[in-house]
Amino acid sequence: MKIRTCRGWSLPAMVLAGLLLVLAGPGPTSAEVRPGRTGWPLSGPIEVARPFDPPTTRWGAGHRGVDLAAPAGSPVLAAAAGTVTYAQPLAGRGVLVVDHGATRTTYEPVTATVPVGTRVTAGQRIGTLQPGHCPPRDCLHWGWLRGDTYLDPLRLGGAAAAPGGDGRVRLVGEAQREVAERRAAERAAAAAAAAAGLGGTGPPGEHGFVPPVAGPITSPFGMRLHPVLRVTKLHDGTDFGAGCGTPIRAPYPGRVSQVFFNPGYGNRLMIDHGTIAGRHVVSGYNHASSYSASVGQQVAQGQVIGRVGSTGYSTGCHLHLMLWLDGEVVDPMSWW
């Protein structure tokens, strides 16, 4: 099977949509045991649109799987024999998980063709690829985990994908390397700014939004083991590491639509930004110690609306940023 790495694919500043079970650990070693006979989750030539890029820290930003380019509607195949343990939509995207015993594989966005509890064999069709991942193209986000540790799924694809194999994959193309280096520099600068207590939050993103706090992303949007509840659930926003009392600033002009307390999210505030690029946009801020803006108030971009805290289900001071497009919760970093 031919494998090639897609070049020239531009990554957004922090694209982490569709990540599954986000409590990352170190990558696999050469001694990693594969679950019996394994193969690719797609038929035909394999094109790696975005490679495995595990974070350097447990809560750091990274890419905890691989994106394989394929047209929407393509059959999705089980990479190894196992039991389907999850097969349903989550945050508007179909997610499917196959348990192989010591490890499990994840597939999204997928419309499942087999129900939970089905025993499947390697290469058996388990779903159909949905559109929407890796825009403007379509692709499958494929993950492989042992417990809470993310492994490189390319090792399951066969000898051609294994390091040192005849068809060794070049995991990082030049364009991707440049983007990765730039992202690393941006994260380092943000962390330095946060440590120094600087007020600036960074330049605006694609839609004119600026980061609400100066600080690194400590937990991205996606499935993860909840640090307080200890259950696997969707992390429905992006966490920014920031000290207690750090100013939270409005990322874009809008009207404060809600301010209230929730046992899980702590002190919450929502800003309705109206229609932008044809989408109704609402942003949300959680776990704050307090808010200085009130319901109905018009806020300007960069205006302080509150202070970072640790209210609700939280293990320490941070900002949990959320975003809704047309009423559907999405990865905030897909908009910034």
Image (cartoon, helix red, strand yellow):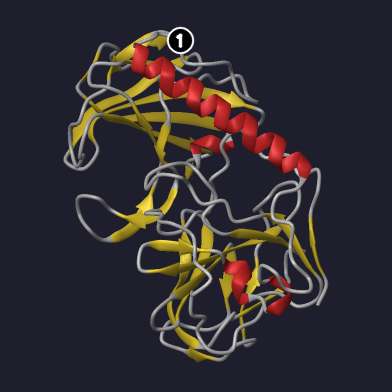
Q: Is residue 326 above or below residue 159?
A: above
Q: Which kind of residue does numbered mark 1 sit on?
A: Gly
* Of the pair 235 and 261, the residue shown nearer to us: 235
Residue 177 visible? The answer is: yes
Residue 156 image point, x, y percent: 60, 76
**Above or below, 266 relative to 31:** above
Does residue 134 appear to the left or right of 334 in the view shown? right
- Secondary structure under the numbered disc 1 in the rendered image: loop
Image quadrant assignment for residue 41 = bottom right
Q: Position of residue 24 (x, y in %)?
A: 41, 54
Could one spot residue 297 in this view of the protein?
no
- Expressed as whole percent of the image width and height from the top left, the position of residue 334 reads 58, 38
Say which residue appears at 57% left-offset and 26% top-offset.
185
Left or right: residue 87 versus residue 184 is left
**Which is nearer the eye, 265 or 122?**
122
Please give the count of numbered marks on the rendered protein.
1
Quadrant, the C terminus: top right
- Give above or below for 86 relative to 303: below
Name the residue: 37% across, 54% down. Answer: 23
Q: Tell me the crowding category of disc 1: few under 14, some 14 to 19, or many 20 or more residues within 10 angstroms, Cα based.
A: some
Residue under circle 1? 200
Determine whether, in the image, residue 80 is placed left or right of residue 271: right
Quadrant of the frame with the N terminus: bottom right
Look at 67% across and 79% down and name the residue there: 158
Question: Whole-percent x and y of residue 327?
Answer: 48, 41
